[in-house]
Image (tube, grey):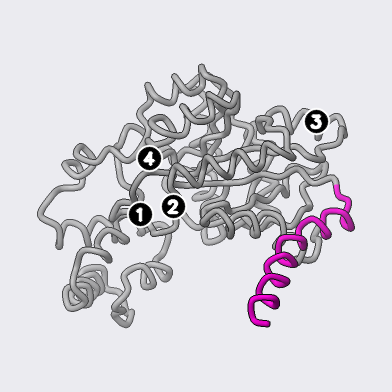
C-alpha cells in the first residue's frame, strides 16, 4: 500500500507542471541565472553552485521546449511587441572564470550563448567581491576569532553593533559606502595571505582578454554594478556611480552597448531612481530575481529564475514555483 501511494504521489508531482502549463497560457519570456558552475566549489563561494553534469542536463531539458535567444534579441522582439512565448535566455552573474573554462565549451556545442553580468571592480581579478571575502573568512576562522574580529571592527570604525558568530549575517547591517573597507579590515586582520596573492593564486574572475573572446563568440555583457552593493540602500549619487558610470566604462572598454542591468541580490531601488538609470544610460532592461511569469512587453520589470539547484529541484523551481506566485505588473 505504501509503495502504491508513493508511486501515485511521484506521478502526480511530475504531472503538476504539465497541467499548469496547459491551464495557464502566458506570453512570458523566461530568463534564468547562474553564478558558479564548476566541478567543485571553493571556500570563497556559497554551497549553492551546481556541477557541470547538472548544467548539461538542465540545458538539454530546456531545449526540448524553449528557443534560446540573447537578451538583445528579446529586447528587439519586445519593442516590436512580438510574442516572447517559448523563448529563453541564459545569464551569468559576477563574471566568474568558469564561464570561459567550462560553460562556453558546453554552450558552444549547442549553438547557445548568454549574457555575462560583470562586477566591474572584479574584472582581471583586481579584487574579490566583499561578500566573498566575508564568506571565505566565515568558513575558515573559528567562532572565537570571528567574534574577536567583529569587536575589533566595531572599535576601529566606532560602530555600535552586537558581535555575531556569523560574519555573513552581521554584514547585512553594513553601510554600503563602507562595505569594502570593512571587508578589507577583517581580511587584513585575520588572514596571512594578502588579497592580491589570494587572487593571483585562485583567479576566480574573467580577464579582459577572456571577455573579449566571449564577446567575439556571440556572448553579451551587462552591468552588475561596480562593486556589488545592495542597490536599495544606495543614495542617488552612489547608484549613479555603481550603475550608470560603471556601464559607461564597460562600454568604452569593450566597445559594446550595455543594454541590461541585473541587480545584485535582486534588490531594486525606488522607481524614481530606476527612471534615472534608464534616462542616463543605454540600459533598457532592469532585472531582478523574483520570477513571476510576467516578463511581457515591458523589459524594465523583467525578472529571472534561479536554476542553481540539483536537477529535480531546478526543474520544479522553473516549471512550478512561478505559477504559485501572483502576477504583478
Mark 4 or mark 2: whose residue is earlier in sequence? 2
Q: How far apart are marks 1 and 3 (CA)?
A: 36 Å
Q: According to the image, label 4 marks what residue?
A: 121
Numbered range of the magenta stretch: 1-26
Rendered location of residue 270, percent (x, y): 66, 58
The Cα–Cα distance between marks 2 and 3, rounded to whole angstroms, is 31 Å
Kindly report which numbered mark, 3 or 4, lies closer to the viewer in this rendering: 3
Cβ atoms under marks 2 and 1 closer than 8 Å: yes
Q: Which of 207 and 269 is in front in this view?
A: 207
User: Considering the numbered disc 1 on the image, is that residue within a helix, a strand or a loop?
Assistant: loop
**Disc 2 from disc 1: Cα separation:** 8 Å
Mark earlier in primary sequence (3, 4): 3
Nearest the eye: 63 or 98: 63
Residue at mark 2? 49
Residue found farthest to the left: 192
For mark 4, give the secondary structure.
helix
Identify whether 2 is placed above or below 90. Answer: below
Q: Position of residue 269 (x, y in %)?
A: 61, 56
Q: Nearer the viewer, mark 2 or mark 1?
A: 2
User: What residue is drawn where x is 74% and y is 57%?
Assistant: 292
Q: What element carries label 2?
A: loop
The residue mark sitting in front, 4 or 2, is 2
Residue 279 appears in the picture as rendered? no
* Secondary structure mostly taken by the magenta-highlighted segment of the chain: helix
Label whose residue precedes the other's in the sequence (1 or 3): 1
Q: Is 298 covered by the magenta stretch?
A: no
Decide whether residue 19 is among the magenta residues.
Answer: yes
Q: Is mark 3 on a helix, strand or loop?
A: helix
Image coords of residue 314 (percent x, y): 59, 55
Residue 167 numbered tag: none
Residue in the image at 74% along x and 32% along y: 75
Amino acid at each position: 500500500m505504501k509503495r502504491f501511494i508513493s508511486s501515485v504521489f511521484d506521478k502526480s508531482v511530475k504531472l503538476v507542471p504539465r497541467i499548469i502549463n496547459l491551464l495557464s497560457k502566458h506570453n512570458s519570456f523566461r530568463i534564468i541565472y547562474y553564478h558558479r558552475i564548476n566541478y567543485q566549489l571553493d571556500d570563497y563561494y556559497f554551497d549553492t553552485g551546481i556541477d557541470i553534469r547538472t548544467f548539461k542536463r538542465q540545458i538539454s531539458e530546456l531545449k526540448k521546449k524553449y528557443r534560446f535567444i540573447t537578451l538583445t534579441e528579446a529586447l528587439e522582439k519586445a519593442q516590436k511587441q512580438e510574442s516572447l512565448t517559448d523563448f529563453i535566455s541564459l545569464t551569468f552573474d559576477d563574471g566568474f572564470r568558469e564561464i570561459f573554462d567550462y560553460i562556453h565549451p558546453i554552450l558552444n556545442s549547442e549553438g547557445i550563448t548568454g549574457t555575462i553580468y560583470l562586477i566591474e571592480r572584479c574584472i582581471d581579478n583586481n579584487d574579490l567581491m566583499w561578500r566573498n571575502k566575508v564568506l571565505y573568512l566565515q568558513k575558515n576562522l573559528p567562532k572565537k576569532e570571528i567574534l574577536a574580529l567583529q569587536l575589533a571592527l566595531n572599535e576601529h570604525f566606532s560602530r555600535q553593533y552586537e558581535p555575531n558568530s556569523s560574519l555573513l549575517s552581521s554584514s547585512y547591517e553594513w553601510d554600503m559606502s563602507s562595505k569594502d573597507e570593512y571587508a578589507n579590515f577583517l581580511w587584513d586582520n585575520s588572514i596571512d595571505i594578502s588579497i592580491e596573492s589570494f587572487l593571483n593564486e585562485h583567479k576566480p574572475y574573467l580577464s579582459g582578454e577572456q571577455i573579449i573572446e566571449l564577446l567575439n563568440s556571440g556572448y553579451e555583457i551587462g552591468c552588475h554594478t561596480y562593486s556589488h552593493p545592495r542597490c536599495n540602500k544606495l543614495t542617488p549619487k552612489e547608484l549613479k556611480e555603481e550603475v550608470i558610470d560603471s556601464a559607461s566604462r564597460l562600454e568604452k572598454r569593450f566597445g559594446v552597448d550595455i543594454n541590461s542591468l541585473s541587480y545584485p541580490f535582486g534588490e531594486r531601488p525606488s522607481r524614481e531612481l530606476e527612471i534615472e538609470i534608464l534616462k542616463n544610460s543605454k540600459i533598457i532592461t532592469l532585472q531582478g530575481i523574483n520570477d513571476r511569469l510576467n516578463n511581457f512587453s515591458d523589459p524594465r520589470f523583467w525578472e529571472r529564475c534561479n536554476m542553481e539547484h540539483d536537477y529535480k529541484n531546478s526543474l520544479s523551481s522553473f516549471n512550478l514555483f512561478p505559477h504559485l506566485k501572483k502576477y504583478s505588473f
